[in-house]
Amino acid sequence: MFELETAANPQKLRRVAIDPVSRVEGHGKVTLLLDEDRKVHQVRLHIVEFRGFEVFIEGRPFWEVPVTVQRLCGICPVSHHIAAVKAMDIIAGAKQIPPTAEKLRRLMHYGQILQSHALHFFHLCSPDLLLGFDSDFTRRHILTVAEQHPEIAKQGILLRKFGQEVIRHTSGKRIHGTGAIPGGMNKALTVAERDELRRDVDQMIAWSKGAVDLVKQMHLTKPAFYNRFGEFDSNLMGLVDERGALDFYHGGLRATDADRRILFDHLDYARYEEVIDEQAKPWSYMKFPHLRSLGEEKGWYRVGPLARVAAADFLSTELANQERTEMMAVGNGRPPHGTLLYHWARLIEVLHSAELIRDLLDDPEILGTDLMADFGPRQEGMREGVGVIEAPRGTLFHHYRVGEDDLVKFCNLIVSTTNNNQAMNEAIRHVARTFIDGNEVTEGLLNHIEVAIRAYDPCLSCATHALGKMPLEVDLVAPDGQLLSRRQRNMTGTAG
Amino acid sequence: MPPPLAAKPKLKIATTSLSGCFGCHTSLCDIDERILELAEVAEFDRSPLTDIKHCSAHVDIGLIEGSVCNAENVHVLREFRASCKILVALGACAVNGGLPASRNALDVADCLQRVYCERGVGRHQVPNDPELPLLLDKVRPINEVVRIDYFIPGCPPSGDAIWKFLTDLIAGRMPRLEHGLLRFD
Ligand code: SF4
């Protein structure tokens, strides 16, 4: 069973909490249980929030959903927007959307990957890598990076800005826009918008290449450390196109084992339930998915940059593919499994996205105005759609059933971060065993655990969509903030 | 002539997200390179952008994203109120509950049951660990829990709106968002 997941005698142990986990999106905390000799007995990443999207989406009109579900996440809203709209294309009866509409959606999505990855690396993670895992915690943030490495910070900020501008031009707003609708897109790209993005894109490619070089240099200074930190074998999953190249927008599901032997390939993602099962645990609102064929102990897997770059056979743009080849060499014939290598893979994906954006902007079809599908006849009875994409943090599943009244009857979401849940727990246990076990627990050492979590770029906002079961607490508060009364009840509904 | 802003000691700005989607924080990052200008006059205290996990005693401006959905949100919000001279509700969730408040129409206990029975979870289990904060039966806007000084609507308010608000406030002007910056979507 999973080592360090559950301590044998928790009552006797000392609890150390990292609360909240900082420089990640959303809410989470880590608890460690240590004995008198500071030996680690239990390590858990708890997702402590609950928002219930899957339930209140039910009863809403299907065409509204691609806009609503963006509010799952303000960092990757486009991912939820597009995964939902792909499901709703099917429900609306549009099997095929026009080529321009697909290209515009891709453009928006590549802009999303670029901005999210840049935000993650530069704004949230670079302080660990550039200033040191145990540097002064009061100064470990982007503004100190800006002071000490002004050029790197500036490029990061402007790369992210570019991604946001791509999103704005395709969806109308930088955050929570409305570009995609079931069956196509509601806005064409103008020549002026295309030219504005085209003007900057070569600079973005150059800066992305620079960012990959930066992380390669870091790796070169301490290769063993970078390869070994949070290193453990796992299965890998991602979407690939028919040639086996990574495809962020559409493709078949591929899963491999830790040695990159294919478990399944080009699987129609509408059949995801046949291959993936989710398990709940009492100490987290985030579920734990695994591949059914391997069972819950062996079947958990990783998604996101390192997993999908490794699982695919190649990347379809030239510079990014060269970088992929270099990164893969680290594994000596096996896929690399070190947690910190996620940063390297993520920056390769920034470069890949920038190249993909350039290619789309150079394609005359991007300026087309045929944006809506011809709808076939609506199917009778229950309608169902599954939309899957590679979101910045990994494979994202949206699954809906709609009634004859066009209202959503059922919604299931497996967000990217949920797919990485077990992997993140493995990573922090690995790091706790290596650095904390038997040592004085300092802020710097605890930050090592957070460094491991951050490498997965967890979006704990996304991950809190699901519902858990727990007692309810009812606070009655006066407008001045005074607590008037507090009532608790357990799940059977009895007041306590 | 008033002295230039940078000559004063730096202001402290704290930010947090309660039950939100992080979009309002993303929008704060949408001030883009102006964040470097902000750094000349202000520093971040507790925030998801820093590793400071509890507010310092004296924070000048607190920005809060998200609504109040569990006991932990209430504690964090009270800590912010106690530490921050000026507390700002940033975005629809903080101002009026936003989309998370959609669950207020439902009986929570009832829909919890439904979700765990209808979705193919292998082994049904009840997340009930003491590490998970107790849930409130209703999602609430933050001004139902503490006093708020300013409200910025929008889902999220744009980076430009946040910038205009902050620069007004820092310069000692009454913050004003004109048409275009003041919006509710
Ligand atoms: S107001 Fe909108 S953008 Fe801000 S946290 Fe709420 S849902 Fe997200």
Image (tube, rainbow, N blue to C red):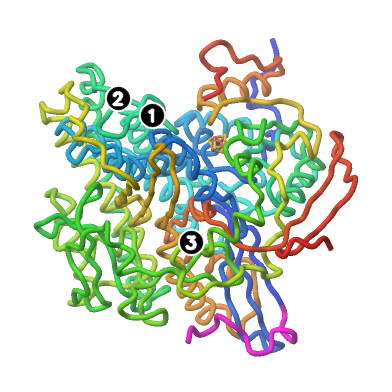
User: Mark 1 — on which chain does it sit?
Assistant: A
CA gap, disc 1 to disc 3?
A: 30 Å
| Range drawn in magenta | A1-14
Say above or below: A474 vs B22. Answer: below
Residue A363: x percent and y percent?
Answer: 11, 30
Q: Is residue A8 magenta?
A: yes
What amino acid does circle 1 point to? Thr
What amino acid does circle 3 point to? Glu
- Residue marked by disc 2: A186
Which badge, 1 or 2, is on the more N-terminal residue?
Answer: 1
The residue shown at (63%, 27%) is: B6
Residue A487: x percent and y percent?
Answer: 84, 55
What amino acid does circle 2 point to? Asn
Q: Secondary structure at mark 2?
A: loop
Q: Quadrant of residue A226?
A: bottom left
A243 sits left or right of A157 in the view: left
Mark 3 surroundings: few (<14), some (14-19) or many (≥20) residues within 10 A = few
From where the camera sits, is residue A136 visible? Answer: no
* Callout 1 touching callout 2 (CB < 8 Å): yes
Q: Nearer the viewer, residue B53 or A68?
A: A68
